[in-house]
Image (spheres, rainbow, N blue to C red):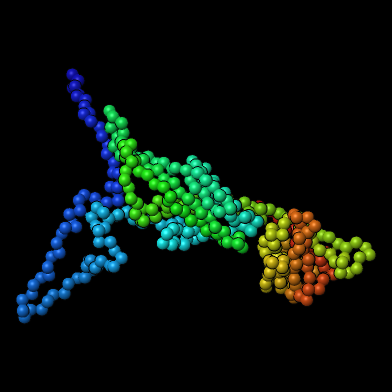
C-alpha cells in the first residue's frame, strides 16, 4: 500500500530582498546608539586605582565629523577605490571629482583621440547611449543608464522593482605637448523609483563618489583591455623581421657623398627599437643614445669566439673602440637610413661598412617570435 503524500500548499510565495537603502545601514536595530556609558569603578580611599586597557577606547568625535551620522543614518558600506588598471594611468583625487591621469604609450597615436575613442567604445560595449559629444571641449554626456532590481517577487502579483536611472559626463583634457591627459567623471542626473513611484532622494557626497568611482573603474577597465591589445600589436610588429639592404656609392662619387650605408625597410621608430636589441648581440655596448637626434654611441669589443659560433669563421672587420650609428629618415616614409661612423663622427671606409652589413642584416631580419 502506497502512503499518500500531501503536497505542500503555497499560501504566498514572497522573496524579499534588501533595498539599496537597507544595504547602507547596520543590520537589525540601532539600539547601541542609546547605550549609556558605564561609569568608572569607584575606588575607596587608600586603595590603588587599577590600570584600564585603552585598546578598545572609542576616541572623541573630531571637529569635521557629523554627529548626526549614527545608527541607521551611518553608511556602513566599505569605500570604493579607484583602480587605474590600464597601462600608463594613475589617480589624482580632488575634493570635487576623481581624475584619472593618462599617459601616451605610442607617440604615433593622438592621445585625445585615443581616450575619446576608448570612452565611446566602452559606452557602445555597455549599451550606453550618448546624449551629447563635443570633441573640441572634450566632453561626452551619456543618455539615461537604467538598472533594475527586484526587491519583492510575488507569484500572483507584479514584482516590486527598484529602478535606478543616471546620467554621467566624461571630461577629457590633454596637455598641449600631447603626452599626458586626464579623464574626469561627474554624475549629472540621478533618479530612483520603487514600484513605479519616484523616490525623494538627496544623494550625499559619498553616494555620488561611489557611483562615479564604479563607472570610472568600468571605463578604465575597458581602456586596459584596448591598451593591452595595442601593446601586444606593437610588440608583434617589433618582433617581425626588418629587411636591410647595403647601399654603396656609384663610381665617380666623392668620398663624403659616396659613403656606403644601410637602408632598413621600416619606419624610424621601429628601426630604432630594433637596434637596441640587435646592437648588443653584435658585440656593441650602447654607452649612450639620443633618440631625438637618432644617435647611438657605441663601444665595440672584439669577441671572435662569439662571432665564430654565429657566422662560422667570419668576424666583424672593426677595431676595438668607440663608434657612432646615426639614423635618418629615408626617401620613403617606410624606410630608415643607418650610417656607421667612428668616434669622431668621421665616415668609415665602404669596405668596413660592407663587411659589417651581413651580420647586421641577419639579426635585423630575424623573426623574434620564432626564437
The picture places residue 258, in percent across and down from the top left corner, at 87, 65
The residue lying toward the viewer, choosing from 171 and 32, is: 171
Q: Nearer the viewer, residue 336 or 322?
A: 336
Q: Does any portion of residue 114 appear in the rendered image?
A: no
Residue drawn at x 64%, y 52% as measured from the top left: 236
Q: Is residue 10 above or below residue 243?
A: above
Tally of marks? 0
- Work out which quarter of the rendered image holds the C terminus and state it: bottom right
Q: Please, which residue is most extreme toward the top here?
A: 1
| Residue 111 seen in render | yes
> Which residue is depicted at the point 23% across and 66% down?
58
Q: Is residue 12 above or below residue 90?
A: above
Residue at figure coordinates x 69%, y 59% from the top left? 269
Please give left or right for residue 85 compared with residue 291 in the image.
left
Of all residues shown, which one is farthest toward the right? Answer: 252
Q: x, y percentage for residue 305? A: 72, 68
Relative to 337, 28 lies left or right:
left
Indicate whether 184 appears above or below 342. Answer: above
Q: Is residue 256 left or right of residue 11?
A: right
Q: Is residue 175 above or below residue 224?
A: below
Amino acid at each position: 500500500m502506497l502512503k499518500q503524500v500531501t503536497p505542500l500548499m503555497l499560501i504566498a510565495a514572497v522573496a524579499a530582498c534588501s533595498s539599496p537603502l537597507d544595504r547602507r545601514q547596520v543590520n537589525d536595530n540601532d539600539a547601541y546608539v542609546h547605550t549609556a556609558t558605564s561609569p568608572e569603578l569607584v575606588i575607596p580611599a587608600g586603595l590603588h586605582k587599577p590600570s584600564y586597557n585603552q585598546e578598545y577606547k572609542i576616541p572623541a568625535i573630531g571637529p569635521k565629523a557629523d554627529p548626526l551620522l549614527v545608527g541607521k543614518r551611518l553608511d556602513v558600506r566599505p569605500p570604493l577605490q579607484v583602480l587605474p588598471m590600464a597601462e600608463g594611468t594613475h589617480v589624482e583625487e580632488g575634493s570635487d571629482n576623481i581624475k584619472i591621469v593618462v599617459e601616451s604609450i605610442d607617440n604615433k597615436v593622438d592621445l585625445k583621440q585615443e581616450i575619446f575613442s576608448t570612452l565611446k567604445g566602452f559606452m557602445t560595449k555597455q549599451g550606453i547611449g550618448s546624449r551629447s559629444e563635443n570633441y573640441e571641449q572634450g566632453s561626452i554626456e551619456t543618455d539615461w543608464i537604467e538598472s533594475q532590481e527586484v526587491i519583492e517577487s510575488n507569484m500572483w502579483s507584479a514584482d516590486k522593482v527598484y529602478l535606478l536611472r543616471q546620467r554621467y559626463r566624461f571630461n577629457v583634457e590633454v596637455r598641449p605637448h600631447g603626452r599626458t591627459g586626464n579623464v574626469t567623471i561627474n554624475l549629472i542626473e540621478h533618479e530612483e523609483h520603487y514600484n513605479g513611484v519616484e523616490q525623494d532622494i538627496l544623494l550625499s557626497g559619498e553616494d555620488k563618489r561611489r557611483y562615479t568611482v564604479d563607472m570610472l573603474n568600468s571605463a578604465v577597465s575597458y581602456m586596459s583591455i584596448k591598451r593591452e591589445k595595442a601593446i601586444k600589436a606593437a610588440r608583434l610588429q617589433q618582433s617581425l623581421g626588418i629587411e636591410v639592404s647595403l647601399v654603396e656609392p656609384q663610381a665617380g662619387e666623392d668620398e663624403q657623398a659616396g659613403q656606403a650605408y644601410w637602408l632598413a625597410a621600416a619606419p624610424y621608430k621601429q628601426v630604432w627599437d630594433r637596434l637596441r636589441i640587435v646592437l648588443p648581440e653584435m658585440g656593441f655596448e650602447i654607452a649612450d643614445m639620443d633618440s631625438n637626434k637618432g644617435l647611438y654611441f657605441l663601444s665595440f669589443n672584439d669577441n671572435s669566439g662569439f662571432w665564430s659560433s654565429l657566422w662560422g669563421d667570419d668576424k666583424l672587420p672593426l677595431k676595438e673602440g668607440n663608434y657612432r650609428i646615426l639614423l635618418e629618415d629615408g626617401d620613403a616614409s617606410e624606410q630608415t637610413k643607418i650610417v656607421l661612423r667612428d668616434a669622431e663622427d668621421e665616415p668609415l671606409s665602404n669596405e668596413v661598412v660592407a663587411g659589417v652589413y651581413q651580420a647586421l642584416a641577419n639579426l635585423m631580419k630575424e623573426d623574434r617570435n620564432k626564437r
